[in-house]
Image (spheres, grey):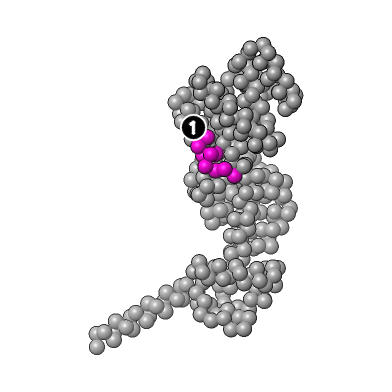
Amino acid sequence: MTASLFQIRNRPDLTLDKCKEQIELAKNENKTFLRQAFQAHLVNLLNREKNFSQSVLLASELVKELKKIDDKELLVDVLLEESIAFYHLSNLTKARASLTNARTIANSKYTPPAMQAKLDLQSGILHAAEDHDFKTAFSYFYEAFEAFDSVNDSKMAQNALKYMLLSKIMTDNADEVNSILVGKTISKYSGPETDAMKALANAAKKRSLKEFNETFSKYGDQLMEDPVVQKHFSSISDTMFEKELSRLIQPYSCVQIEHISKCVGLNRDLVEKKLSQMILDKNFMVVFKVMDCLLFLIRKLWTLLLSWQWRRFMRLEKW
């Protein structure tokens, strides 16, 4: 980050309107570098205000200009902000392209730890969003967390930690959440954010849809107000729905759909639709549907049955 941009970012009084005034003033005085620094900050402010369309327009023009003068430090900053804006506009292809350009330039020069942490954080967010590759995302979030912690940026470190824990939940490793949180470096970040993720992990371990929904209601500010977590809400919710149904069904060879729907607190049609999807995905092998009952053969039992039939066939062949 250039000295002028660093100074600008540390001015809490610099609102959108004031920033625009400073840009016009710098234009009138032909102070190109100062104008570009204020424009870079304006892109950041527009993202904070969730005005992502305007942010992309300004960033795109500024990137073209900065490439001509080869201002690498400012260019990395603007490309990162452009990637963030594209992500929130659900244009993941362009978000990835902007981030790749930013990382390529950052790798060609010295990049301060704070900026490297931001690049890693955005990399993790995009891996989770594009391919649902939460395993790779976790690695990036961990790198970002360590870097933010080293520069004492507690707010960003807490965000990276939250996404680390989310990654564990999404990779069906919710039981690792508590062990991560007892680490010496991490324990100092305990608070509502980590409490929310612990509650979410506990719901996942219990395979309880009710606890999952209660967690999102109780920790709305920490979960639903976070755009990254919010983008994965439907995926997490769908996974929890499947886990709850599996938990209820697995002990039995015959279940009543009406009873299952009452247990999960959802209407019968929704439950039946989800069960049908799970059957198609081969989570369960269904033999018959009789009246309101489904007769199940769990995959393990089905495998044993086939194995037994095969052995019997081989014995007959010997005769």
Q: Residue furthest bottom?
A: 319
Q: Is residue 95 magenta?
A: yes
Residue drawn at 54 percent across, 22 percent down? 66
Q: Is the C terminus in the top left, top right, bottom left or bottom right quadrant?
A: bottom left
Please name the amino acid that badge 1 sits on: Asn
Tell whether position 44 is magenta: no
Q: Is residue 76 above or below residue 248?
A: above
- The answer to which of 139 and 187 lies nearer the viewer is 139
103 versus 132 height, above or below: above
Residue found 68% across the figure and 23% down from its top? 10
Mark 1 lies on a secondary structure that is helix
Residue 258, above or below 212: below
Q: Residue at x 66, y 58 (%)?
A: 212
Residue 275 drawn at (x, y percent): 58, 70
Residue 250: x, y in percent?
Answer: 56, 72
- In the displayed structure image, the side of residue 14 where residue 164 appears, left or right: left
Give 195 or 294, whichever is nearer the viewer.
294
> Relative to the observer, which residue lies in front, 192 or 102?
102
- Please state if 51 lies on the left or on the right of 283 as rendered: right
Where in the figure is residue 31, as x and y percent of width and height? 63, 13
Q: Position of residue 95 (x, y in %)?
A: 55, 39
Report which residue position mark 1 lands on: 101
Query: Which residues make up the magenta segment?
Result: 90-98
Quadrant that contains the N terminus: top right
**Dominant SS type (magenta):** helix
Q: Left or right: 232 with respect to 143?
A: right
Q: Is residue 263 visible?
A: no
Residue that extends furthest to the top in the rendered view of this protein: 29
Total labels: the figure holds: 1
